[in-house]
Structures are given as C-alpha cells and as structure tokens.
C-alpha cells in the first residue's frame, strides 16, 4: 500500500483575531456581526487581495491567511491595523473592534485547502501574544522583511509559546497612526507641526443633486482619498475620519489642527440638466490660503466612467501641485533630510526634461540617497535620471547608463515590489533594449498598481511602435491625455504620437502632433528633431532646418548616430520605418556623428 503523499510548502502565515470579542458580542450581538461584515468588506478582504494573500478560513472572531511573500504578509498586516485605527477614530471606545495579528514564516502542510503545522501554530501563538491593534512577527518573518519595508521593529526577545518546543524570537511592528515611514534620523531632529504632504479630503458637497446622487459624490471623495495615499511621502487621513465632517460647518484651520495635516481638499458636485460641474480647491490649513483650484464641466455620460476620469485628473494635478508646495517648503528647511531632497529633485524633474533641470534633479536624488541609502523613491528617480542621460542627452555611455539604471530599479523593486513607478521605468529600459513585449508587461503591471499612472498608457503605445505596430499608438496616447490633460509630461506623450505618425509615413499628422507637443513644452529636444524629419519629408526644408536648429540649441550633442541607437533590437518593420526618420533628420541638417 502506497502512503498518500503529504503536500508541504514554505509560506508566510497571518493569523488575526478580534480582541474582546466575547464582550462585544455580549453587549451588541447583531451590531458586532454587522460591523465585522463591514470590516471584511471595506478593510481586511480588500487588503488581503491587494497583497496577494489567500484566505484559508475565517471564524466569528478571526482569520487565517496564507501569503507567498513575507513582505506582502507584514505589509498587509500593518495596513489592516492602520485601516482599523482610522475606522475606529470616530467610534466610541467601548464599541471599537480591534485586531491582534501574528505573522510567521514556516513550513506548512496543505490538506484540501486547509493548512496545518508549526508554521501555522507559531503565527497563532504570536497573535495571542500581541496587544490589541498591534502586529507581532516571528524571527523567521523578520529576517525576510528587514530593510524591505518603511517600518521599524522592536525586538521583544525569545518567548516560550504553547506547544512549540523551542522559544520563538518575537518582534513588534511600530505601526504609526496613518502611514508607514522611516524612523527619524538620529542626527536630524523630528519636525514639529503636521507631517509633510499631510492632507484630508473632506466629503464633497452635493449641490442640489438630491440624495440619489450622494453615491456618486461620495465615490469621488473616497476614490480620491485612496489615490492620494499612493503619492510618495503622503500622509492621508482615512475616509472614515474625513466623513465625520460631512454636512457640518467647517473651520479649515481648526480641522488642520485637529487632524494635524497641512492641507485640506474640499469640493462640490453640481448637476444641471445633462451636465455635471465639479469644483475643487486646495487649502493650506496653517494660513487658510487657497493654493490651487480647478473646475471640471462635463456632459453627463456613464457616471462610473465619469467618476474614474474626474478622480484620475484630480489626482494627477494634485500630485504635481502638492510636490511643488513641498519643494518650496523644503527649500527653506535648515537641515533638509532625505525626503526633502527627494521632493526638490522631483520638482526640478517636473520642470521639463532639459539638461540643466535633469542635472539639478539628479544632484538632489543623489543627496537623498547619501542621507538614506534605502530611500526607494529616490533610488527609482535616480534610475530615471540615468535613463534620460543615457538615451536622450549623451550616447557615449548609453549602455553603461542603462545598466546602472536597471540595477538601481531591480534593487528598488526588491525593497518595494509593488512600486508602480519602478515597474514603469523598468518598462522604459526594456523598450530601449529591444524587449518591447516585456516592457508592455511592466507598464501594465504599473497600471495595476496605480491606475492613474497616465505615463504608462503612452509608453505602451511607444513600445507598440517599436514592435512595428505604430497604428495602435495614438489611441494609447489619447488615453494618457484624457486621464491627465495638463500633465507636466503630456508633451512627451504627444511626441510619441507624432513619432508614430512619422514612422507610418503620415507626415502631416506627425507635424500636427509635434507642433502641439512643442506648444505644451518647447524645451524637449527630441520633439524638435522629430518635427524636422517630418517637415523634411514634406519638402518644407526651411522649416525643417529651423526645427533642427531649435533642437541643437537645446542639445548640441545630438547626432544621427545617437538616434540610431535610441531603440535597439526593434521589429524589422520598425527598424525600416526608423531609417526613413533618420534620413529626414539628415536632410534637415542634423549632424551625422
């Protein structure tokens, strides 16, 4: 008789239960059950899915979840506790539901979907040791996540736990109230006042739309809160706390003091006939001054599609405005820290891709990494600077620059696997190296992680051009512009469309797109050279030479040879099309090199 083979695997296990469950049920059985269902729907299940966990089983007061990654398990545990802290902020203390969570990495046995073994038992014992609202991790889990999360740990030492032969090393995660952040530097004092980039999105006012429109208005507020929380360095007050202000008179300065935030975003939605108008304004809570305002006025279409488009546009414009505000603040800081330099670098970068701007941005990102070598966001942006210098500004060390950029991105993604912009930039590197299909996969992954990353839509179109499918590019560019029409880099996307038209031989359409790109930002040299080629093929030689000279004034190092190496290993159709473009540049007077 052959014994049945036992299935085993190594996994990260999260065990959670409700502290004081019996007391809560005794006080209000139906209310507690309803609250737990809402928490699963709004907090726990969404976070588990977001971090690729599998819910093995749930009980009335707890859950057992399996992850393939310890980093995902601990990140999920911390975000659940943060979400619960936000949710509980407006609930009387005696009615609050709080979790205790334990995380372990160990060998498990799988049987008909359930899991057993010491790997599970240790996680359950850690959960029992944990304080309400906390996360305890084992030494094996800690070894896998240290240095990979923006969170600090307290070593609680080795603990004897029931039915486990050896003591278990236990670490407590220091969660923080809203956002994970690095521990303050020993050499830089903690700042007084609200955290940088701290904001609350107040519930938008529904002006005359009736209660049936509340779901649409509230949906904008909730989605915008979620999307802003993805902004690097942000400290965003949760929707449950924000919604305690719904329908109440507001003193924005007082809200800033109560919630300890720098910025308040407020807005309104008004429906009239077949149009919807959305007004928003960003306020500095310290001074009460209005920093930025925007209005959207659109015909009513599918409300959910409208909601997505409005939120995407707002998130994109707010991101740019908030980073500019933080850069102005940090420029006055007496002892700038790593994130101060990161914000300053980002502000320089978003002024446009000219050599002086990129040089200054690079200096800021390098300084940020000197102060904090594990600043993932600065590492990603520095990789972008290497890509720009290697492909757009100087061809002499192109391969070396791209290799350094790729190495930096791989390190960044090992520290933060779900870094959307990191995946996006890796896609750009893949496009430049002739791996356009891999590039598209990276761009799509970036969009899964951040649906508002309009960049990725345009660069999917660019990668398709390299695959010989330029006829598909324009639609992707238009989607990027639809989501972020005033983006600081919209000119690059328009250039993508113009290049695609030029590669297809549609020279008049290419000129229209490229002129539009130059109107948006005249300081991107690539657009001028591409326009020069299109004009040359149309026989408008004086205009072509003027465009080439405008490009050379921005970047005198440009040569035909550099453009030949801009995209290596493209599809044969694309490579043939690109030779036509290079010939147009040659006619326009771009040096051979």
Image: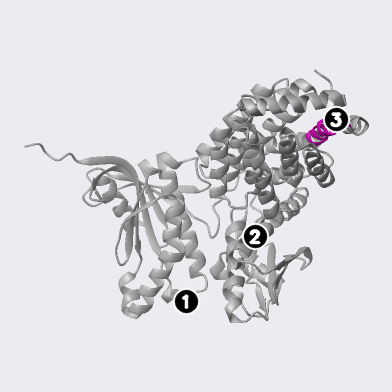
- Residue drawn where x is 34% and y is 69% of the image: 20
Q: Residues within 10 Å of mark 1 (few under 14, many from 20)?
A: few
At mark 2, the secondary structure is helix
Residue 79 seen in this snapshot? yes
112 up-or-down from 565: above or below:
below
Span shown in magenta: 526-539
Identify the mark nearer the N-term, 2 or 3.
2
Residue closest to the eye, 179 or 323: 323
- Residue drawn where x is 65% and y is 35% of the image: 465
Where residue 287 appears, as percent x and y from the top left, is 77, 66
- Report the disc number at residue 536: 3
Taking the magenta stretch, the answer to whether it contains residue 117 is no
400 up-or-down from 510: above or below:
above
Residue closest to the eye, 551 or 420: 551
| Residue extending farthest right | 542
- Report the disc number at residue 92: 1
Q: Main secondary structure of the magenta part?
A: helix
At mark 3, the secondary structure is helix
Q: Residues within 10 Å of mark 3 (few under 14, many from 20)?
A: many
- Report the disc number at residue 309: 2
């Amino acid at each position: 008789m052959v014994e049945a083979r036992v299935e085993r695997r190594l996994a990260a296990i999260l065990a959670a239960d409700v502290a004081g469950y019996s007391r809560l049920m005794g006080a209000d059985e139906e209310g507690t059950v309803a609250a737990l269902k809402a928490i699963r729907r709004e907090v726990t299940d969404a976070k588990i899915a977001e971090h690729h966990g599998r819910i093995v089983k749930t009980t009335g007061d707890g859950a057992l979840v399996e992850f393939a990654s310890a980093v995902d398990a601990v990140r999920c545990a911390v975000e659940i506790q943060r979400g619960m802290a936000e949710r509980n902020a407006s609930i009387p203390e005696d009615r609050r539901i709080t979790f205790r969570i334990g995380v372990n990495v160990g060998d498990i046995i799988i049987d008909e979907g359930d899991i057993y073994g010491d790997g599970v038992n240790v996680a359950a014992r850690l959960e029992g040791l944990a304080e309400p609202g906390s996360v305890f991790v084992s030494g094996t889990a800690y070894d896998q996540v240290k240095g990979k999360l923006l969170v600090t740990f307290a070593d609680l030492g080795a603990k004897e736990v029931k039915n486990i032969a050896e003591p278990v090393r236990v670490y407590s995660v220091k969660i923080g109230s809203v956002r994970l952040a690095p521990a303050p530097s020993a050499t830089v004092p903690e700042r007084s006042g609200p955290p940088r980039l701290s904001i609350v999105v107040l519930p938008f006012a529904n002006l005359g739309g009736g209660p049936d429109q509340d779901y649409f208005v509230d949906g904008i507020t909730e989605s915008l809160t979620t999307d802003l929380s993805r902004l690097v360095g942000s400290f965003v007050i949760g929707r449950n706390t924000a919604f305690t202000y719904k329908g109440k008179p507001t003193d924005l300065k007082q809200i800033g003091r109560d919630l300890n935030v720098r910025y308040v975003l407020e807005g309104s939605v008004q429906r009239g006939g077949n149009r919807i108008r959305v007004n928003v304004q960003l306020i500095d809570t310290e001074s009460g001054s209005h920093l930025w305002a925007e209005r959207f006025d659109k015909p009513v279409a599918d409300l959910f599609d409208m909601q997505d488009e409005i939120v995407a546009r707002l998130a994109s414009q707010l991101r740019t405005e908030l980073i500019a505000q933080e850069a102005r603040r940090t420029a006055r800081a007496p002892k700038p820290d790593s994130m101060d330099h990161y914000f300053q670098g980002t502000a320089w970068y978003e002024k446009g891709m000219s050599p002086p701007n990129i040089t200054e941005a690079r200096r800021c990102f390098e300084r940020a990494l000197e102060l904090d070598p594990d600043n993932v966001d600065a590492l990603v942006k520095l990789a972008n600077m290497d890509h720009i210098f290697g492909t757009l500004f100087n061809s002499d060390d192109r391969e070396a620059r791209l290799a350094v950029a790729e190495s930096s991105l791989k390190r960044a993604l090992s520290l933060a696997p779900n870094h959307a912009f990191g995946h996006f930039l890796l896609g750009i590197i893949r496009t430049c190296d002739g791996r356009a299909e891999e590039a598209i996969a990276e761009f799509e992954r970036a969009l899964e992680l951040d649906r508002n990353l309009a960049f990725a839509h345009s660069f999917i179109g660019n990668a398709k051009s390299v695959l010989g499918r330029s006829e598909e590019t324009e639609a992707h560019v238009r989607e990027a512009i639809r989501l972020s029409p005033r983006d600081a880099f919209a000119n690059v996307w328009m250039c993508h469309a113009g290049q695609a038209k030029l590669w297809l031989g549609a020279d008049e359409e290419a000129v229209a797109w490229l002129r539009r790109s130059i109107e948006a930002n005249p300081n991107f040299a690539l657009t001028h050279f591409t326009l020069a080629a299109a004009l040359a093929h149309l026989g408008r030689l004086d205009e072509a030479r003027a465009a080439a000279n405008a490009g050379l004034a921005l970047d005198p190092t440009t040569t035909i040879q550099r453009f030949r190496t801009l995209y290596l290993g493209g599809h044969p159709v694309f490579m043939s099309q690109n030779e036509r473009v290079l010939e147009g540049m040659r006619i326009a007077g771009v040096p051979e090199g």
